[in-house]
Image (tube, grey):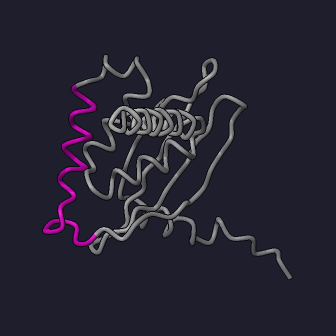
Amino acid sequence: MKRLYTMKHLLILFMILITGRLFAQSSPQSLIDNFFLTYEKDPGKAVKELYATNNWTERAKDDIDKVIGTVNGFTESYMGKYYGHEIITTKKFAESFELYSYLVKYDRQPLRFVFKFYKPNDKWVLFSYALDDSLDDEIEQAAKLYYLDLDKN
């Protein structure tokens, strides 16, 4: 009898964990939070799980495998230690389409991860994910005189 009671508790705990995971992924931010939690331990798995939110991405399996290979290549011997991430910007284009840009910090250099999410009906899915290392070029361009407001007093 005691063992059945323990199994019931385990089943209830399991159901709570599953339900919590489903509710936790009801927004783009929660999908990103989950991505970075996994990314710390296994970057390739994080990318794979992110793409798995959208059934249509199976058509781009080869491209996804390339991205997974890229992030798996960010080893400590290549990029140095991973220090986390910081939000750069978010853009809401409509109630159902949002962009999130993050700075990803490594010893060697920063990277930018751009996430675009789409909500076609009742759940958010990944629309696209991109990464690049052109932050230094962009910040240099932003500092050019023609971008500055020289009419300020």
* Residue farthest toward the left in the current orientation of the protein: 77
* Residue farthest toward the bottom in the current orientation of the protein: 153
Q: Position of residue 121 (x, y in %)?
A: 63, 17
Q: Which residue lies at the image location 42% right of the left edge and 33% below the top edge?
A: 8
* Left or right of 92, for residue 108: left
- Which image quarter is the C terminus in? bottom right
* Left or right of 128, for residue 142: right
Tell me which corner region of the image, top left, top right, bottom left or bottom right, holds residue 117.
top right
* Left or right of 97, for residue 62: left
Answer above or below: position of 139 versus 19. Answer: below
Q: Which region is colored magenta?
A: 62-81
* Left or right of 60, for residue 138: right
Q: Position of residue 97 (x, y in %)?
A: 63, 32
How many numbered circles does the render carry?
0
In the image shown, does 9 or 40 lie closer to the viewer? 9
Answer above or below: position of 31 versus 146. Answer: above
Q: Which residue lies at the image location 26% right of the left edge and 30% below the top edge?
A: 63
* Residue farthest toward the right in the current orientation of the protein: 153
In the rendered image, residue 151 lying in the magenta stretch gets the answer: no
* Residue farthest toward the front in the current orientation of the protein: 1
Q: Position of residue 43 (x, y in %)?
A: 28, 50
In the image shown, does 140 or 43 lie closer to the viewer? 43
In the image shown, does 27 or 112 lie closer to the viewer? 27
In the rendered image, residue 75 lying in the magenta stretch gets the answer: yes
Tell me which corner region of the image, top left, top right, bottom left or bottom right, holds residue 146.
bottom right
In the image shown, does 12 or 69 lie closer to the viewer? 12
Q: Position of residue 125 (x, y in %)?
A: 51, 28
Secondary structure that dominates the magenta span:
helix
- Which image quarter is the N terminus in? top left
